Amino acid sequence: MKESAVAPGAILEIKNLSVVYNHRTLGEVHALSNVSLDVRVGEALGIAGESGSGKSTLLKSILRLFGAGETAEVSGEILYRGRDIMKMRPEELL
């Protein structure tokens, strides 16, 4: 049987997402390490955690919305409907 590229019913799949900021005074800041999750059709997902736990970094990674002057190394996969958004051109994200 052929294996599906998208988990059944998954709209968003995040696989082993890691983010390291290159801070000018602190050096490397490991903000996320190997985060994985799926959001399926009809599901809602809430992100909660303490200050500095990576909530904003997770969402900025998904949306590719790092601010001007922010330098971050992002690794892993972020699949939206089976397409890796980290490999998409900005105009494809609209």
Image: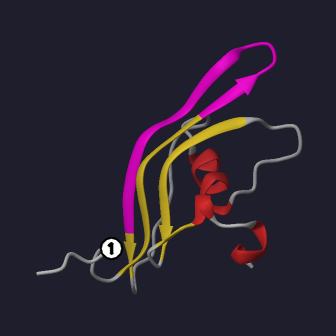
Residue farthest to the bottom? 42
Q: Amino acid at mark 1?
A: Ala
Left or right side of 65 for 51: left
Residue at 72 percent across and 25 percent down: it is 22
Residue 52 locus on image (x, y percent): 61, 34
Q: Nearer the viewer, residue 92 or 62?
A: 92
Q: Secondary structure at mark 1?
A: loop
Residue 18 locus on image (x, y percent): 50, 39
Q: Is residue 36 magenta?
A: yes
Q: Is residue 69 above or below residue 64?
A: above
Residue 9 locus on image (x, y percent): 32, 83
Taken as a whole, is the magenta stretch helix, strand or loop? strand
Q: Residues within 10 Å of mark 1 (few under 14, many from 20)?
A: few
Query: Can you say which quadrant of the picture contains the N terminus?
Result: bottom left
Residue bearing mark 1: 5
Q: Is residue 48 magenta?
A: no
Residue at 63 percent across and 45 percent down: it is 57
Count of labels in the image: 1
Q: Is residue 16 above or below residue 94?
A: above
Left or right side of 82 for 71: right
Q: Which residues are magenta?
A: 20-38
The image quadrant that residue 54 belongs to is top right
Q: Is residue 90 above or below residue 8?
A: above
Q: Nearer the viewer, residue 59 or 69?
A: 69
Residue at 40 percent across and 86 percent down: it is 42
Residue 28 locus on image (x, y percent): 64, 20
Residue farthest to the front? 2
Query: Can you say which quadrant of the picture contains the C terminus?
Result: bottom right
